[in-house]
Amino acid sequence: MPKEEFKVTPWEVSGEIDYDKLISKFGVEALDSRILSRLKKQTGVLHYFFDRKIFFAHKYFDVILNDIEKGGKFYLYTGRAPSGPVHLGHLVPWIFTKWLQDKFGATLLFQIPDEEKFFFQQNLTLEETKKWAYENILDIIAIGFDPKKTKIFLDTEYAGHMYKHAAMIAKRVTFSTAKALFGFDNSNNLGEIFYTCMQSVPAFLPTFFEKKPTHCLIPCAVDQDVHFRLTRDIAPSIGFPKPATILCRFLPGLTEGGKMSSSVENTAIFTHDSPEQVRNKIMKFAFSGGRDTIAEHRKKGGVPEIDVSYQYLNYFLEDSQKLKQIYQDYKSGKLLTGELKEITIDVINKFLKKHQVAKEKAKSQVERFMMRD
Amino acid sequence: MPKEEFKVTPWEVSGEIDYDKLISKFGVEALDSRILSRLKKQTGVLHYFFDRKIFFAHKYFDVILNDIEKGGKFYLYTGRAPSGPVHLGHLVPWIFTKWLQDKFGATLLFQIPDEEKFFFQQNLTLEETKKWAYENILDIIAIGFDPKKTKIFLDTEYAGHMYKHAAMIAKRVTFSTAKALFGFDNSNNLGEIFYTCMQSVPAFLPTFFEKKPTHCLIPCAVDQDVHFRLTRDIAPSIGFPKPATILCRFLPGLTEGGKMSSSVENTAIFTHDSPEQVRNKIMKFAFSGGRDTIAEHRKKGGVPEIDVSYQYLNYFLEDSQKLKQIYQDYKSGKLLTGELKEITIDVINKFLKKHQVAKEKAKSQVERFMMRD
């Protein structure tokens, strides 16, 4: 698929994504040095996700910064639509959200829209999505969010507080608008069509509760911005501040440059994978930027930019000096693909070992985080 | 407007309605003597609404009767979408529902979809519909429903229990189907499009609660049947029995043959109207089937079929012998329009006096009826 034909919607990501084009297509802004230096003034250090362009764009994050600089507060909102196990790609915005929570002491609303994938996937039941919801919540808690400042809720359980606000939004969105934003047609079901209203609600909830405008910052993958574009369009008409988004790229799948996805075979490393499974997946499937022969590799060097193992290090190896060294060694041909893969396997497995221990501990923590009524 | 062009949707009723045509258009059945005699075997007497063709059609009421004849149970479901004060026309299905509850000791779910009119009327707020909801509930309770067997709920308050079931329905209805049933187009808002799913929910709720199929009978005005046609289409796919409807005509408005409506000026008698207001409205606006002069009236007689005062007696004068006499006297010219109006004013005012006393008493009863979580 040529670069022009890539597709990024909340329900489909395909083709080779041109993130610069997405910025102009979605009407968002690049996270430039000016805004990052303003952030750094507040946080002391910046998360390595910025340097590595993993978080690369935003909308109205400058407004949040204006507020912060005046001593104001904001809250965080992100989410997870359950339909299967959590993979490494899902963790990226959550890790970043935790960083923001730590730096600003911000309250976090964590939405689990357990009806979303039910609407969009023919054979999925609400019982299944709910089962996955509670399984996935363990992964969320394992990230280390502050239980005193984090509220997790399922749409089907918390709807008593959400539906009336979703109705406020629904009244202000025509089918015409939803068609243009999401590409709906006559064959979409009424759940798919209405769902975006439920995703808008947490972008306003504290304002409803506290009866005063409260700024919302939503860290998420770039495909979700379309929902909040709709939210932002409506916000002024209900007298609420427009939610800000801060947007990340997709972690690549093992075999291709697209998006790590549970539904595409051999592209995902799950948080429940054993060290052996991680080793096998990376060794067998991780697309390599290395050369065909060792001799050629030593001579021409590898291409880290297209090498999936290297990309995973870009996301999960915190030590930037070490990463730089690996980049140089791989590019020069000093480091072979097999060696690069060993490093990646080691980094991922260390990360997952810690995560799996935290996930086990999370089992006794669930009720501290849940908001049901 | 010629008879062919009448329109009956849940949101618009216009033209001179041909109820026989509606029966075939909506795919429902006439309430014929065979089904009524089966009902009479159960109830001893029949409500006068049957004789007078006020309740005139049904869908699957025969299935409810099959159940009853085998000693089975059913529950009742009806509703009221609040946006203003209750008028006489609203009371007709409620009066009939109370009769069924009394005769069969049936549980009644009374839905107050306080979001419906909010979606469909530009300037209405959710605060206003909720205010009207609680005002209208007094009228509902005044009808005399059994507080032990009647549960009243607002959609925005009870959504915690409804949304997940609405989602089950929403997944199974395409926009294409909703367009065909309700006449939606691109300009409809997402609330209008989704709303029918919420109206379907009470047709299944006890089945969800009790985890066994429970038959539902919905007494309502004929314009509401379209929602339940959708519900019936979906029921088998979620393993639930199809809800039955038993359908009534519209009480005519004062000035015309259509439907009594709060939004059309001078057509409605409200339950809060004083005896003087009722007198003025009927005297001034009630369309007369009488002749232009007394002499002509005495000679040719009046036309009760088109006389709105007479129609009101048809709905509210219980004494069928007396009604028959009035019909004959009016048709023969013995009874003048002014005299007929006096009788009607007297019947309506007696009815409203009793209703207003019951409504006042209802103020202390609300919590006995409400179901919130």
Image (spheres, coloured by chain):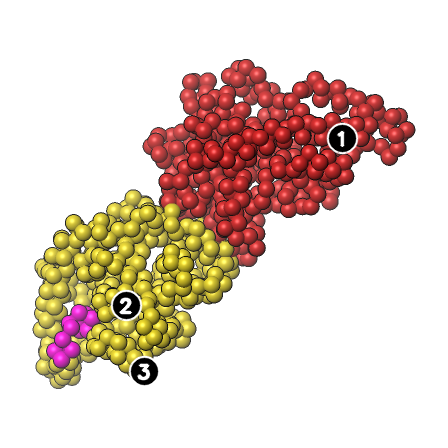
Chain colours: A red, B yellow
Up/down of B44 relative to A99, above or below: below
Q: Which residues are magenta?
A: B306-322
Q: Which mark is residue A341?
A: 1
Q: Amino acid at mark 2?
A: Phe
Q: Disc 1 and disc 3: Cα gap in Å? A: 80 Å
Q: Disc 3 and disc 2: Cα gap in Å? A: 24 Å
Q: Amino acid at mark 3?
A: Arg
Residue B79 is situated, as x and y percent measured from the top left of the image, at 30, 59
Q: Are marks 1 and 3 in contact (CB under 8 Å)?
A: no
Q: Disc 2 designates what residue?
A: B250
Looking at the figure, which quarter contains the C terminus of chain A?
top left
Which of the marked residues, 3 or 2, is nearer the chain's N terminus?
A: 3
**Residue at (60, 20) in percent of width and height:** A33
Q: Is residue B320 magenta?
A: yes
Q: Disc 3 designates what residue?
A: B34
Foreground: disc 1 or disc 3: 1
Q: Is residue B295 magenta?
A: no
How packed is label 2: few (under 14 Cα within 10 Å), some, or many (20 or more)? Answer: many
**Quarter of image, res B324:** bottom left
Residue found at the far right of this picture? A295
**Quarter of image, res A74:** top left
